C-alpha cells in the first residue's frame, strides 16, 4: 500500500524529462545536482546552464523548452489534465530560452505564462523565444509562429505576431520585424 502511495506521489511530481543535453547544467532543488539525459523535472526545479551548454526539456503535455548557454530557468507550476484547468508557469531569469507549446496551447492557452525580468509572456498556440541580458538590461522576445502577448511590468500589453519581436530595455519598448532565425552562437 505504501509503495502505491509513493509511486502516485512520484508520478504527480514528475512534470517533464530532459530530452537533450549539450555541455553541463545543474538542477537546483533542495540541493544542486548535475543535469543528465533522461532526468525527471519537477515543479520548483531551476535549471542553470554553463557556457556553451544547452538543455531541452519536454513537459508532460509535449511542450518543449530549450534553455541556452549561461541561462537560468524555473519550472514554477505545471498541471495538465487535458482541460481548461491546466496550467503552466515558467520563469526565465537570464540568458536564452525557446518554447514550443504542446497540448495546453489547444485546451488552455490563457493559462500558459512565461515570466521574464520585465514582462509576462502569454501564448496563443505558438513557438517563441527570449533572450535576457542582465548586464545590458535588455530583453528580446521573438514569435516564430502563432501569436504571443507580452504584458509589461511597467504597464501595457503588446501583441506580437509570427515573424515579429519586441525589444525591452529600461528606456525603450520596440516592436519590429524579426531578422532571421535566432542562433545559439551569439550567446555568451
Image: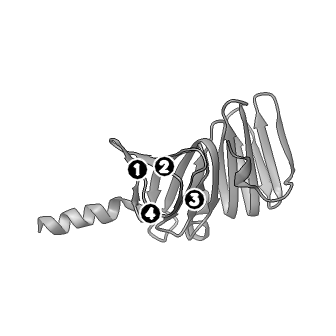
Task: Give whichever of discs 2 and 3 has the lower sequence position.
Answer: 2
Report which quarter residue 172 is drawn in: top right
The answer to which of marks 3 and 4 sits earlier in the sequence is: 4
Percent x, y of residue 161:
80, 58
Label 2 belongs to which residue?
25
- Determine the secondary structure under disc 4: loop
Q: Helix, strand, or loop for circle 2? A: strand
Identify the image quadrant of the C terminus.
top right
Q: Where is residue 117 shown, x and y percent of the image?
A: 63, 36
**Residue denoted by label 1:** 34
Residue 30 placement (x, y as % from top left): 32, 42
N-terminal-most mark, 2 or 1: 2
Local packing at callout 2 (Cα closer than 10 Å; few below 14, some 14-19, many 20+) is many
Q: Which colour scheme is used?
A: one colour
3 vs 1, front mark: 1
Earlier-in-chain disc, 3 versus 1: 1
Q: Could you tell me which residue is drawn at 74 percent across and 47 percent down? A: 186
* Label 3, label 4: how far apart the Cα atoms are: 14 Å
| Disc 1/disc 4 C-alpha distance (Å) | 10 Å
Location of residue 171 with respect to 82 vertically, above or below: above
Give me the C-alpha separation between circle 3 and circle 1.
18 Å
Dot 1 falls on a residue whose secondary structure is strand
Label 4, on which residue?
A: 37
Mark 2 / mark 4, whichever is N-terminal: 2
Amino acid at each position: 500500500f505504501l509503495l502505491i502511495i509513493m509511486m502516485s506521489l512520484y508520478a504527480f511530481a514528475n512534470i517533464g524529462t530532459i530530452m537533450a543535453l549539450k555541455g553541463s547544467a545543474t538542477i537546483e532543488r533542495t540541493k544542486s545536482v548535475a543535469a543528465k539525459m533522461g532526468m525527471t523535472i519537477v515543479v520548483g526545479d531551476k535549471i542553470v546552464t554553463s557556457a556553451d551548454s544547452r538543455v531541452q526539456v519536454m513537459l508532460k503535455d509535449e511542450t518543449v523548452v530549450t534553455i541556452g548557454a549561461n541561462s537560468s530557468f524555473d519550472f514554477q507550476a505545471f498541471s495538465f489534465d487535458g482541460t481548461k484547468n491546466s496550467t503552466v508557469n515558467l520563469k526565465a531569469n537570464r540568458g536564452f530560452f525557446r518554447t514550443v507549446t504542446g497540448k495546453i496551447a489547444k485546451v488552455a492557452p490563457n493559462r500558459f505564462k512565461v515570466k521574464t525580468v520585465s514582462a509576462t509572456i502569454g501564448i496563443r498556440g505558438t513557438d517563441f523565444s527570449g533572450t535576457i541580458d542582465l548586464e545590458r538590461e535588455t530583453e528580446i522576445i521573438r514569435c516564430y509562429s502563432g501569436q504571443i502577448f507580452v504584458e509589461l511590468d511597467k504597464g501595457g500589453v503588446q501583441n506580437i505576431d509570427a515573424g515579429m519581436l519586441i525589444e525591452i530595455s529600461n528606456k525603450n519598448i520596440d516592436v519590429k520585424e524579426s531578422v532571421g532565425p535566432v542562433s545559439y552562437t551569439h550567446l555568451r
